[in-house]
Amino acid sequence: MTTLVPREPYSPEEVERLYPQSLRLRQVQVLLRHGERTPVSARFKNAGLAAYWPYCQAANEMKSAVMSADSSWDTMAWRRRLEVFDRQMDATSGSDSPALTQTSKGQVHSICQPGELTDRGRETTLALGERLRSLYVGQLGFLPSLLDAKSLSAVYLRATPIPRALESTQQAFRGLYPLTSRSVDLPPPVIVQRAIQDETLFPNEGACKRFGELAKAFADRTAQILNPSSELAYINKRIGKYMPVESPIVKVDSHPRLSGVMDTINATLAHGPATKLPSEFYDDKVRADIDSVCVKEWFVGYTESSEYRKLGIGSLVGDLTQNFVKAAQSTTKPASLGTEGSFKISLSGCHDTTLAAALAALGAYDVNTAKWPPYTSSIAFELFQAESATEQTPSAPSSGSSWWSSLFASAPASTNSTAIRTPVAEMTPTQQSSLDGHFVRVRYNDTPMTIPYCRAAGRHLEGDESFCTLRAFKEAADAVTPRNWKEECRANLGQPALMGAIERPPGL
């Protein structure tokens, strides 16, 4: 899928149903996919598609911190122009002479880098922030209307090192708190980032070598099974003639890969008429088949392999859950603003693979029916607390014999009682009781999702399976959270990656 078409704001009746008075909202953690962008690589120039697109006005509004002679700091405004070898713009020239990138009409300003957030992407992520403000400030009164120095720590911002994720976070924050809703003395907000080798806000094949092996193995199996399929045959019938001569057949593992073809199609659909492919690429069946195959290639591993879940997205799921545990444990001893874990809302700029992986690892993303997350998609993880003891839920029953029950009962025992991510089974009775009366709900693009593990009696709010008890949600998260992501990423290297996986899963 491409651009997200957001639903209308919740009606008062929907708000009353989705946010019952018996529950008090305590914390919200939002994972947001970056907005619309250019393709990460130039493809299909033989089909008339320009390599560089003129949709980035931010290139004319650049600002950088610069040091002055007296060691004070100032801001330098500048405009970016892209320079490339002639042959990158004209495949027939064969020249290595540098030249400014320009459009077919000679435009040299507002040219985007590959994979850059476009003006459209800035608009949609700004609008996402505005929708969050409408809900959490306007309709629920959960967040303060005016952000000042005292309340700034109620908002936690994070982004991957990829510029489009950072810029999308900035735009969403701008929508959540526009300048008119910030005090004049408000200091600049902090946005947390990590070095790429420590990043767990997306499935990190480069930093986690074992996950790289797993991802390749599952992708190769998908290619082996689906390359001869009727879906790929139809795709080739329609667009195969546009593939490069060195890789003339569209495959899961062709060059470009099928996911790369999808990347270019979706990017062109999100932007103007100057950057469009031939009509065959927009055939409804072509798009549906590409989406279906790519979802299976990238995400089926989360449904089959515990190791895949843990190394791909488990560390992030563990972080999200731990934040909820901290918030729940502060119920009887409230944390003051500015202390660790005291934020009320977090915005984390990330990627399509983050969102689908997080949902799939928790069982809330069916790879046989789900669509690829559109640009500016989001997941809101919401923590609630019961307003009265009448909402306290009984202890969850022991695991049954279902696949999900056996999966979540399989978390290994810890030998370190002081570990940050202590599993529920190893918590002290006092720590376990701090989870009682709290519930977690997951909303994907404003639609409440149901986590299969939480369907059992005692694991959800009575009458609504989408509200997991915090204990049940943590048990589900414990099953996919690695003990030590760095160490486990270095373990089992070279071992069979598909051990225990289904040879041909249903739907493949």
Image (cartoon, grey):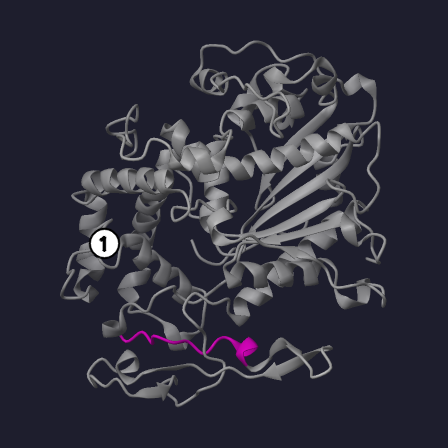
Q: Picture coordinates of residue 429 (x, y %)?
A: 71, 13
485 left or right of 149 in image: left
Q: Is residue 355 above or below residue 408?
A: below
* Vertical position of residue 461 compared to residue 493: above or below: above
Which residue is at 14% across, 63% downward? 246
How would you classify the magenta stretch by its main secondary structure? loop
The residue under the point 73% across, 54% down is: 133
Mark 1 lies on residue: 235
Q: Where is residue 357 in the image (x, y as percent from the top left)?
A: 46, 40
Amino acid type at mark 1: Ile
Frontmost residue, 214 versus 416:
416
Q: How crowded is mark 1: few (under 14 residues within 10 Å), some or many (20 or more)?
A: many
Q: In which quarter of the image is residue 64?
A: bottom right
Residue 202 in percent (x, y) is at: 48, 47
Please state the horizontal and vertical placement of residue 44, each as a whole percent of the image.
27, 69
Quadrant containing the C terminus is top left
Magenta region, residue range: 48-59
Location of residue 286 with respect to 211 vertically, above or below: below
- Magenta span contains residue 318: no
52 is within the stretch colored magenta: yes
Does residue 135 appear anywhere in the picture? yes
Residue at x 75%, y 60% (from the top left corner): 177
Query: In the image as oriented, which residue stretches furthest toward the bottom?
Result: 106
Horizontal placement of 107 versus 229: left or right? right
Question: How many numbered circles are shown?
Answer: 1
Q: As displayed, is residue 165 above or below residue 463?
A: below
Q: Left of 239 or right of it: where is 413?
A: right
